[in-house]
Image (cartoon, helix red, strand yellow):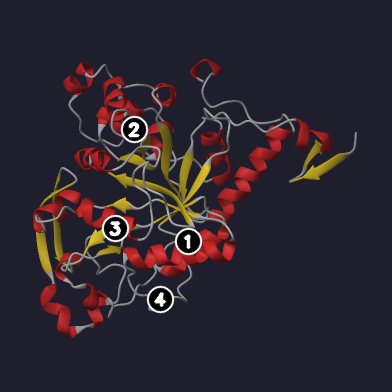
Amino acid sequence: MRVATIFGVGVACASLVDLPAKWPTPNGKEVQLLGHRGLKSQMPEHTLGSYWLAATAGADYVEPDVVLTKDNVPVCFHNLYIRDGTDVEKFAKFSSRRRNFTGELDGKPTTIENEYFISDFTVAELKELRVVQKEVGVRPQYFNELFQIPTLEEFLEEMVTAADKLGRPINIAPELKHPVYHNSLFPCVRFEDHVLQVLQRHGYALKRNHRPRKGRGKLMLQSFDFESLKYLRTKVDLGVVDLVMLNDDDPYFFTRAGLEELSKHANWLGPWKEYLYLNPKEQFDGSKTKYNSSQVDEWGGFLSKCEVVRIAHRLGLKIVLYTFYDSREKSQRGCAIGCESEDARAEYTYYFSMGIDALFVENIGEAIQARTEYNTKLWARIAPELTCPSRFY
């Protein structure tokens, strides 16, 4: 039998056709890669340039964060405030907009000082500003002050244009940022409804009886706010729209009771990756994140990382983890108890072998290369051992 060499691995050519590469995901399909804030390792995040690069680089989904302006226009930006990430301080006429905020964000007491909040600017005023790249790792600084903050509508139009040029739909995964904050400021129409209205107006289906317009890919909506996610569930049909419960420090969704409740309202769980690198309890304790141990016991206690994967999958929940950085940036792998050596390929392989369904990544090229190498090893029957014992799958 003729043998080909791919990524340094000798593979019998017939195996590429006759022996399908089955991943340890429930459906046996390869992990999906989501462009986190576009392709932020190479272009200023949440700009049309960043989104375009993510799409053309081969991301399975492109992710914009969404916040509201003073005139209730959904725009794409990560934070509620813009001093870090734009050139707003060059504009003397906006200096009076600087203010402080003290209140709750995502259920946590929060103080933000001396900032410019997007909710204090109209979309026309925001369009006067330009986005700048953070100086992290090897992110290029050549594209600073080229791009405006895009509206959600502009993002959607850009993805339709990219789909037309690439000859394939572009899947999207908007994250609705801080819904309680927005709904307290603008109570007449919910933040969630503003976003849904824009999506529907641009041809995205929300219900089974809706027909998407040509060129629209799959739609995934994300939130760190469970009440917001439950509200979204009343407005969309699961399967037509995927709903992701993001989780950075809520112990509830690392218990059986929490996963069972989540499965009634969403079809994806999206935790910070470190909860499934260590174990949830180790991550909470190691990072000194406070939680009510008696409450956790009432929910059935913390699950192990492998139990989270197994039970979530059995309940019909897929798992997407965040965030996988460019290999020239710190991965934060294991840092709650002692940072592991930097090795992006090993990190990807660990989660591929765990059966995780999707990853938010910041260097699409590196992630695709790691996925391709893993596929090649599956074809050659030399894939690494499963991260969790086989009884968990």
Q: Nearer the viewer, mark 2 or mark 3?
A: 3
Q: Quadrant of residue 236?
A: top left
How far apart marks 4 and 2 lie (CA) works out to: 36 Å
Q: Are marks 4 and 2 in contact (CB under 8 Å)?
A: no
| Element on which disc 1 rests | loop
Q: Nearer the viewer, residue 249 or 29?
A: 29
For the residue carrying disc 4, how many other residues have a C-alpha within 10 Å: few (<14), some (14-19), or many (20+)?
some
Say which residue label 2 marks: 283
How far apart marks 1 and 2 lie (CA) works out to: 27 Å
Say which residue label 3 marks: 66
Residue lying at 25% horizontally and 74% vertically, measured from the top left: 126
How far apart marks 4 and 1 lie (CA) works out to: 13 Å
Tell me where residue 82 appears, x and y as whole percent.
Answer: 25, 67
For the residue carrying disc 1, how many other residues have a C-alpha within 10 Å: few (<14), some (14-19), or many (20+)?
many
Say which residue label 4 marks: 144
Q: Quadrant of residue 275?
A: top left
The amino acid at mark 2 is: Gln
The amino acid at mark 4 is: Asn
The amino acid at mark 1 is: Ser
